[in-house]
């Protein structure tokens, strides 16, 4: 009987912890509302002053199902919100486009809850260890939007995607790529020691970043366009020699 009571008490504690974590996240977002233009207003007061007649949509957030980090006691919960699909680039069958606005982490061993971000963001993709083939992966990657790079007053699809990395419990969050460059592709080495990130600049300049996953530092950052020009020069010199 005591064991049953203890189990019920643990479930109640976990339930309150989830509610508390969600409440904290909601407080962070409580100042945000969306107008008919889908996206997060960077400055709500300025947007409303310029468009006082626009209808505003209240934030609709929910916590997704828990996902387990492979070979650990960590669970992650995606905190999601929706935007009208007709204003987004991707159309979903239910008329709504869902985004992750934050990640909640829970450590069973430590009975500890934490939020990943302390500001509004749009997380478009998460790469975390989920099965045996990921056993060498001791990090989580996030690709998303954190700043209004096109200066239209919103965080949304037109802004640059940047890359973040953290430990598997959500600690040690680090932004790898700068806001000024847009992430386009990532290749991770088979041993999870190196990562190669393809990026684009304002004038479609292409960059390649080499990142050391073990030491969490940039090894090299080069402009691919400059290397292409060097290749062209080599070929021109070769033709001249003929």
Image: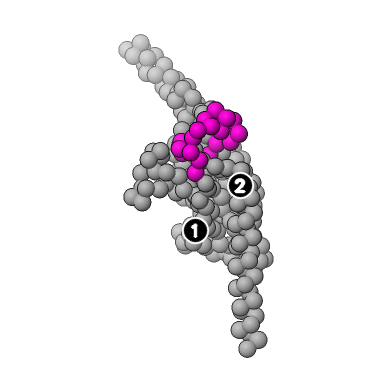
Question: Of circles 2 and 1, which is in front?
Answer: 2
Q: Residue at x 52, y 43 (%)?
A: 122
Q: Which residue is drawn at 34% across and 14% down?
A: 239
SS for callout 1? loop
Measure the C-alpha gap from mark 2 to mark 1.
Answer: 19 Å
In this view, the residue farthest toward the bottom is 1
SS for callout 2? loop
In this view, the residue farthest toward the top is 240
Mark number, residue 240: none
Question: How far across and down, in percent of the image, does residue 73 sit?
Answer: 59, 65
Name the one closer to the observer, 158 or 44.
44
Q: Give the range drawn in magenta.
A: 36-57
Q: Left or right? Give the position of 19 relative to 89.
A: right
Determine crowd level at label 1: few under 14, some 14-19, many 20+ residues with C-alpha closer than 10 A.
few
| Mark sitting earlier along the chain (2/1) | 2
Mark number, residue 30: 2
Determine crowd level at label 2: few under 14, some 14-19, many 20+ residues with C-alpha closer than 10 A.
few
Quadrant location of the C terminus? top left
State the colouring used for the structure image.
one colour
Name the one closer to the observer, 233 or 158.
158
In magenta segment, residue 160: no
Quadrant location of the N terminus? bottom right
Q: Which residue is drawn at 64% across and 64% down?
A: 17
Question: How far across and down, in percent of the image, does residue 92 sit?
Answer: 36, 47
């Amino acid at each position: 009987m005591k064991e049953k009571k203890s189990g019920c008490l643990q479930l109640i504690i976990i339930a309150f912890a989830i509610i508390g974590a969600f409440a904290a996240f909601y407080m962070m977002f409580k100042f945000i509302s969306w107008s008919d233009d889908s996206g997060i207003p960077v400055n709500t007061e300025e947007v409303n002053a310029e468009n006082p007649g626009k209808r505003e949509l209240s934030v609709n957030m929910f916590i997704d199902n828990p996902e387990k980090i492979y070979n650990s006691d960590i669970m992650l919960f995606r905190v999601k919100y929706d935007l009208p699909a007709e204003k987004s680039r991707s159309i979903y069958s239910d008329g709504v486009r869902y985004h992750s606005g934050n990640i909640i982490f829970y450590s069973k061993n430590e009975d500890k809850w934490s939020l990943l971000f302390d500001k509004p963001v749009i997380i478009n993709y998460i790469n975390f260890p989920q099965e045996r083939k990921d056993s060498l992966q001791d990090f989580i990657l996030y690709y998303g939007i954190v700043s209004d790079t096109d200066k239209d007053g919103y965080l949304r699809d037109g802004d640059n995607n940047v890359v973040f990395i953290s430990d598997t419990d959500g600690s040690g969050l680090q932004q790898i790529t700068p806001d000024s460059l847009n992430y386009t592709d990532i290749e991770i080495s088979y041993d999870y020691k190196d990562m190669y990130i393809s990026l684009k600049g304002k004038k479609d300049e292409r960059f390649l970043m080499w990142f050391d996953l073990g030491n969490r530092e940039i090894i090299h950052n080069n402009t691919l366009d400059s290397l292409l020009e060097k290749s062209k020069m080599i070929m021109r010199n070769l033709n001249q020699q003929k």
